[in-house]
Structure formats: structure tokens, C-alpha cells
Image (cartoon, rainbow, N blue to C red):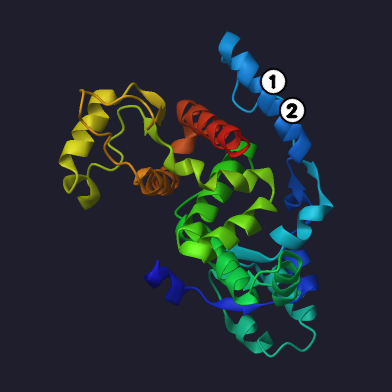
Amino acid sequence: MGRKAVQIPVFLVNRRQMDYLNPPERMRFLHPEAVRRWAEERRRRREEDEGEPLQGLDVAPWDSYQEVVAVGLYVAQLDGAQKQELLRLAEGDPEEEVLRRHNGPAIFLCPERILSWAGREGVNPNLVLDKVYYHELGHALMDTGPTPYGELWGRIVEESLANWVAYRRFQGQEARWVQRLIQGEPAEYQGYLAVEEGFVFLGDRKTLAKWDWYTRHLWRHLWYKLWERGYGFLDRGLPPLLPGLPLPMQGEAGAYNFRLWREAKRQKWFRDPDVVRTYAGFAEELLLRAVD
């Protein structure tokens, strides 16, 4: 994370610039009441018939979230037209020349909205700034290949993981304040704690076997192989393999799922319908657990 942080510049932008970077199609979210009704119906239907993940959910314009979503943004690359429009909206900002010369990924933060959000919630503005920055840095870390963010399931997974990255940077009272901030965000952002409650498995793909991370956890990897049942989501609340044996990787599911998501992008696995269905199911789990 530290290496990525020093590689990516941060630009402070005004509201007009931030709203330009977040066009109307990005300002569509799940309605909280619709999610609650869907969750009740989905739990009932899952007992009778599994059905399709996230079936019956649609996003719609939801302006009230603008002040907590269009507050920060990670951009992998600005094209020439976007850069020119940002410069036109700069209103004499001293960072104008730096932006003009920059090419490549960047993080944009809107101080006006950060201060406004902090004031509404009674939270230290520096803490809000840190939370927003870490969230966007999480997106930067996940920028390893083509993203399915345009799909509802892709947005739920991506935003929940980005909030997981942000939340894990804080401890004690600060962590509780960050949770308070997240409570005011859309439902798609709410699965940040649930990403630690189970593991996404992608069949017989040797996803992480080449990494040191697995060699340091050989027993845990063996446990994973014994439990593996193809594509799906394994709840860490399942009973242990043998009486008295603890569930492995507890507390590490978030890191595992984060790395797997990055690798799925890198390897372009979303071309596989089974991988898409698995992640759609994961997104549904995140949403259902977030509204419990």
C-alpha cells in the first residue's frame, strides 16, 4: 500500500470538477428501503429455490448520496478532453499546472465535501479525509485489469473491498467513527465487514498457489483444498474439519478475497460465466449480511 501511495498523486478539486468526474450514470444506487424489502424476500425464497443472485434489484438516481460518494475518486487515466474540462473548471486552482502536466493514475478529493460530511456527522475532518483517501487508494490497489464495475455485483464487491481497506487502517474510537461514516453510504458500500466472513473459491484454479502467502500457510492451504467444492462462497462459520481443530485463516478472509479479486481482474477471469456467477453470489452475500 505504501508503494502505491507514493506512486499516485492526489489532486484537490472543487465541487464542479468532482461532479464532472462523477456523471449521472455513476450517481445511481440501490435504494435502502428496496434493499431491505429484497433481503426479506430473498431469504424466504432461498429456502425454496436458490434463484439468480441479486435478482429483483435495480439501481436508480439517488441524489442524497452525492455528498458522500462524489467526495473522492480514483481515475486510472484521464483522456485529453477530460483533462481540459477539469482545467476549465479549476477556477484558478494552484494545482492547475501540475494537473496539466500529469499523465497516469490519480486520486481526486473534494475538500468542500469532506468538510461538509465531517460537519454533518460531527467527525474530525482529518479523519474523514483519511477515510476517503484510503478508500480511493483501495480502488487503486484493485486496478489490475478490466473491471466489472459496470455490473451491480461488480460494484458491490469493489466498493465493499475498498471500504474494507479503509476501515482496516483505523483502530479504537477512530474505527467506530469510520463505521459511522460508512453507515451513511449506499448499500453497495456496506459489505466491508462481511468480506471477512467467508472465502470465495473459484474451482480448481491455482489462484494463489504460486504466492509466498500460501507457502507460509501450508496447513491452511491443505484445509482449503479439503473443503473446496468447486465455485462458490465458503462461510467461515462452518464447523471445523475435525473436532478441536480451529477454522484456518480466521481474520484473513478479507485479505484472501481482496487478493483474489485483484487476480481475477489481472487474469481476465470474468470472461468465464461461472466466475461471474460466483462473484454475483458473493455480492449477494455481502449485501444480505450488511443488512442483517
The answer to whether 96 is drawn above or below residue 69 in the figure is: below
Give, as a three-letter code, the residue at label 1.
Answer: Glu
SS at mark 1 in the image: helix
Q: Which residue corresponds to the image point at 73% horizontal and 40% vertical from the top-left?
A: 30
State which quarter of the image contains the C terminus. Answer: top right
Give, as a three-letter code, the residue at label 2.
Answer: Arg
Q: Which residue is mark 2?
A: 37
State which quarter of the image contains the N terminus. Answer: bottom left
Q: Quadrant of residue 206?
A: top left
- Count the numbered circles shown: 2
Q: Which residue corresponds to the image point at 52% horizontal and 64% vertical from the top-left?
A: 173
SS at mark 2 in the image: helix
Residue 109: x and y, percent? Answer: 65, 72
Q: Which residue is mark 1?
A: 41
Marks 1 & 2, CB-CB < 8 Å contact = yes
- Report the side of 238 relative to 221 (left or right): right
Residue 76 visible? The answer is: no
